[in-house]
Amino acid sequence: MTIIYQPLPELQVSEWLNSSQPVQLADLRGRVVLLHAFQMLCPGCVSHGIPQAVRVRDAFDENEVAVIGLHTVFEHHEVMTPEALRVFVHEYRLRFPIGIDRAVRGDPIPSTMRALALRGTPSTILIDKSGQIRMQQLGQIDDMILGCMIGKLIAEPGGDKVREENATLPVSIDSPDAADGCSGGSCHIG
C-alpha cells in the first residue's frame, strides 16, 4: 500500500446539525477526526456506518477524537431533504455534528463528496492531528481495525505534520467494486 499525506479540504456544508456554529477543520487540529460520510437512505449507512460512528464517539475522549458526520446525497435528492435529515438525526439520537454537503446546481454529486473523490456511502475518512487524510474507505470497516487505526493516530505526535517515516496507515482501503446502486453494505455512485 502507498502511504501519502493529503490535506483535508474544508468541508463545503450548507447547514450544520448538532452544532451551534459551523465546524471548522482548523479548529480540530490536535485531535484525530473521524469523518463519516453517509446518506440516511443508504442501508449500509444505517446498519453499519452510523452505529460505528456513534460507537467511536462514545469510546474515545472528545478531546482526542472528534466525530463529524457528512450527509452527502448523490441520489434520491427529492426525499433526502434537510427537514427529513433533522427528523432522522432526532430519531437515531445522533449527538455529533453533522454537515449537509452543499448541492451543486446541475450536478448530482455534492461539493465535498466531489472534492474528496468519494465513490459512495458509507465512507469513512480518518484525519490525523495535523489535518492530513490518512485513511479513506468506502463500505464497512471492522470496528477492531478502525479502533486500532484511531489508536495509532492518537499515539502520534501532536498537531505538527507527522513525518512520513512515522506513517503506518494507508490512505485508502478499497472494498470490492460493486455495481452502481446499493449492494454489499454500501451505495455506489452511478
Image: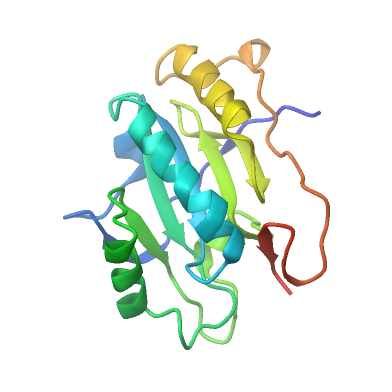
The residue furthest left is: 20
Residue 88 visible somewhere in the drawing: yes
Image location of residue 119, percent across then percent down? 69, 60
Say above or below: 105 vs 142. below
Image location of residue 54, percent across then percent down? 39, 43
Say above or below: 116 vs 190. above
Q: Which image quarter: residue 27? A: top left
> Which corner quadrant holds the N terminus?
top right
As rendered, which of 155 and 91 lies closer to the eye? 91
Q: How is the image coloured?
A: rainbow
Say above or below: 40 vs 142. below
> Which corner quadrant holds the C terminus?
bottom right
Image location of residue 70, percent across then percent down? 44, 57
Say above or below: 155 vs 49. above
As rendered, which of 44 and 67 lies closer to the eye? 44
Q: Is residue 97 left or right of residue 8?
A: left
As rendered, which of 138 and 14 lies closer to the eye? 138
Image location of residue 95, percent across then percent down? 27, 49
Q: Residue at 22%, 54% (x, y): give it.
A: 19
Q: Is residue 152 left or right of residue 178?
A: left
Q: Residue at 43%, 25% (x, y): give it.
A: 129
Q: Residue at 55%, 83% (x, y): give it.
A: 76
Q: Residue at 59%, 14% (x, y): give it.
A: 163
Residue 161 visible somewhere in the drawing: no
Q: Is residue 180 left or right of residue 165?
A: right
Q: Is residue 127 left or right of residue 19?
A: right
